[in-house]
Image: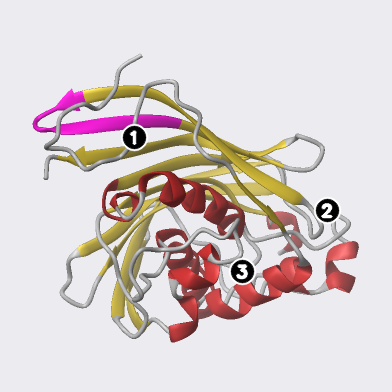
């Protein structure tokens, strides 16, 4: 199976802003409920910041901004607010470090996620491993 | 051992070197499929058993962010909604997690410091699998402001 259909990102590449609406299925309830019975205090569940970052990364793969089939090696996430299902979020980023070693490529992407008021919700950095041998 | 004694801070029992309540969860292929459908990350390495069996992993693996969710759950369980507003997480993914693995998220408060009207809490966090191999490890930081 050919995993990478688009060209590899390059250092300094700006990931253009993507906006999308969060579906109801991605509320924090989905993730918290199965884990040892932990519950949130309020009835209206925010979306977990980790899930939010995961959704954004998947969106980028689908749009071809980053290749699919990457492996996360390092994540740095800072939360600064909540978003709820049904709200629109804005995601943008930039490719930072880009290292090729043998048949793998390591890249770091810095990103920020804003809510519908354009206030920061999550920002951080994710390191991804691209098995370039499969290209 | 220090305690947060000021009444101006939210009532969270915080002491340095305190062990955080753990969160454990068995990861099933159903969980992985569910996460894939919600996140849209339908990489065959996660959801296609035939494809994944031919890779170096020999089986499907859980999404990194799905494993990281256990740490989020643990922090939320220990610190409540403040974690969602003022949390900071830095982790390194060390090993993949496979369907059937029972993952345990553990943590320990390493340091508490006061700065500019807020308390900053530093925790060491890790997730281990059934064989007690560390799947991910790192630090979590939390800022608690005066109420």
Pinpoint residue A22: horizontal percent, then vertical percent: 39, 81
Tell me: A40 left or right of B70. left
Q: Is residue B108 left or right of residue A6?
A: left
Main secondary structure found in the magenta portion = strand
What residue is disc 1 on? B13
Q: Which mark is residue B57?
A: 2
Residue behind mark 3:
A68
Scheme of image coloration: secondary structure
Disc 3 sits on a residue from what chain? A
- The part of the image, by quadrant, that contains residue A120 is bottom left
Which residues are the magenta region? B114-123
Q: Which of the 4 quarters of the picture holds residue B132?
A: top right
When the figure is inspected, residue A91 is found, relative to residue B139, above or below; the finding is below
In this rendering, the answer to whether A123 lies above or below B126 is: below
Q: Residues within 10 Å of mark 1 (few under 14, many from 20)?
A: few
**Residue, x 76% and y 65% (percent of image)?**
B28
Q: Chain of mark 2?
A: B
Local secondary structure at mark 3: loop
How far is the residue under mark 2 from the one under mark 3? 17 Å
Label 1 vs label 2: CA separation?
41 Å
């Amino acid at each position: 199976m050919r995993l990478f259909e688009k060209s590899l990102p390059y250092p300094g590449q700006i990931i253009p802003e993507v906006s999308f609406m969060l579906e109801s299925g991605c509320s924090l309830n989905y993730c918290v409920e199965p884990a040892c019975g932990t519950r949130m205090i309020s009835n209206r569940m925010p979306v977990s910041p980790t899930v939010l970052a995961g959704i954004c990364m998947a969106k980028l793969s689908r749009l071809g901004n980053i290749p699919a089939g990457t492996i996360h090696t390092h994540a740095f996430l800072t939360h600064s607010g909540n978003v709820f299902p049904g709200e629109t979020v804005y995601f943008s980023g930039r490719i930072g470090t880009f290292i090729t070693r043998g048949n793998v490529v390591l890249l770091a992407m810095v990103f920020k996620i804003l809510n519908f008021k354009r206030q920061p919700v999550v920002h951080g950095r994710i390191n991804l491993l691209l098995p370039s041998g499969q290209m | 051992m220090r305690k947060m004694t000021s009444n101006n801070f939210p009532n969270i029992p915080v002491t340095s070197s305190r062990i955080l309540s753990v969160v454990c969860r068995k990861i099933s292929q159903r969980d992985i499929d569910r996460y894939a459908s919600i996140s849209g990350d339908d990489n065959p390495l996660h959801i296609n058993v035939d494809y994944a069996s031919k890779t170096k992993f020999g089986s499907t693996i859980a999404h990194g962010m799905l494993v990281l969710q256990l740490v989020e759950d643990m922090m939320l369980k220990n610190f409540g909604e403040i974690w969602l507003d003022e949390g900071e997480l830095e982790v390194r993914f060390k090993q993949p997690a496979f369907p059937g693995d029972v993952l345990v998220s553990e943590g320990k408060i390493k340091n508490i410091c006061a700065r500019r009207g807020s308390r900053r809490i530093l925790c060491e966090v890790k997730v281990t699998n059934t064989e007690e191999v560390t799947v991910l490890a790192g630090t979590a930081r939390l800022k608690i402001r005066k109420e």
